[in-house]
Image (tube, grey):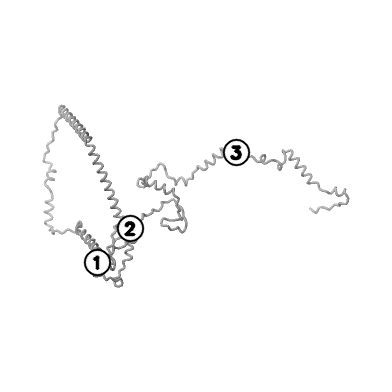
Amino acid sequence: MGKKAKTSRKGKKAWRANISTEDIDDFFEKSTKDALSGGSLASAPTESLFVIDKSQDLSVKKKIEKKREKVLRVDSMLKKNPFVEPVPSSKQKTSKKKKKEVFKAEDTPKDESVSDSGMVLMWGDGGQHGGKARQVSKQSIIPAVEVEAPGCSYNPSFESHQDSLAQAVAEEMQKAYKIELGPQPVPLTVMGEVVDEDDKYFIEADSGSDDDINEDDPAIERRPLKTKRVTRVELNKRARKKELHKKEAEAKKKQELTKDIDNLPDILQEIAKEDEEKQKKHLRKAIAKQERLKACPPRLGKYKFQPAPPQVLLSEELTGSLRKLKGCATLARDRFKSLEKRGLIPPSAKSGRK
């Protein structure tokens, strides 16, 4: 379409004839439509335009819940079967005390990024997984660095040196006596006389017994055993005897019960003494266990812990000067034995240099 031709606006008649009235016509048309439809939306209140539906659509709610309850086949395969019981050996026996400790540990908030040793994990949480938690090793009673006795010094006093030397000698003698007085090992070979081939036949012939020959002989007749018939008189006599024994046992039981009632104070005293002895025994066991833990660690591996011998200098080796002291590389061995004694690593077999 081309441009609209310009009209002349000279005079009032030409001006009025060329003025556009489309806006006015649109306004009147819109106002008539609003009047017919119930009023203008701009002037209508908000409450009349929007309504909040508070009624619940049960069908939609049921559909949503049904969708949530639906379990995928992959998830159902991973679930445990309630009808299959686990193997008894795989069940973890948890006592009430352990359960209480677990509940206490869950109640107290703990920073997972900080480990038990105080070290902070480099990569944060390190990936959360539902596996078993790492077992924390118990703190050992034995110190990391043990101080030797004063007699083990390079310049000890005479009395302390003699005490340490006597202790070392006693340990060595104890080991020697244990080997000497212990059970003798079973010999691999047994010494005996050489038997000739001709004598072997005589030995085999003598090994047969006469009893076997007599038992297998069919010529020997065996007499049948005769069973004696039990009469009614004998049965009545047995019944009376049985009843008499029963009455005697009941009377004896009553007599013992009356005797126990009479001796009740003595019995209570004995029970109290036994309880006291049990408590003392339990205390002795606990003390012995603590002393044993101080001396050697719990059994970890295949081999037992063998403590290192005390590093005591002989009387000829005492110089009194640190400069003249004979050097020996025992520091690494001492640290290794310390780790074994504290139960941090399992003891290894004693291997000499080849």
Please give the residue where the numbered disc 2 appears in the rendered image.
142
**Residue 340 occupies which quadrant of the picture?**
bottom left
Q: Viewer-proximal residue, 104 or 113? A: 104
Which residue corresponds to mark 3? 54
Q: Amino acid under label 2?
A: Ile
Question: Label 3: how many residues lie within 10 Å, few (<14), some (14-19) or many (20+)?
Answer: few
Foreground mark, 3 or 2?
A: 2
Placement of 79 over or under 254, stated as above or below: below
Q: Nearer the viewer, mark 3 or mark 1?
A: 1
Specify whether residue 68 is in view.
yes
Residue 243 in percent (x, y) is at: 19, 29
**Which residue is under mark 1?**
158
Check disc 1 and give the amino acid type: Phe
The image shows residue 150 at horizontal and vertical percentages of: 28, 64
Q: Is residue 113 left or right of residue 184?
A: right
Query: In this picture, is 128 found above or below 156?
Result: above
Which residue does the image show at 80% across and 54% down from the upper left? 3
Label 2: how many Cα within 10 Å (few below 14, some 14–19, many 20+) = some
Does 312 appear above or below 125?
below
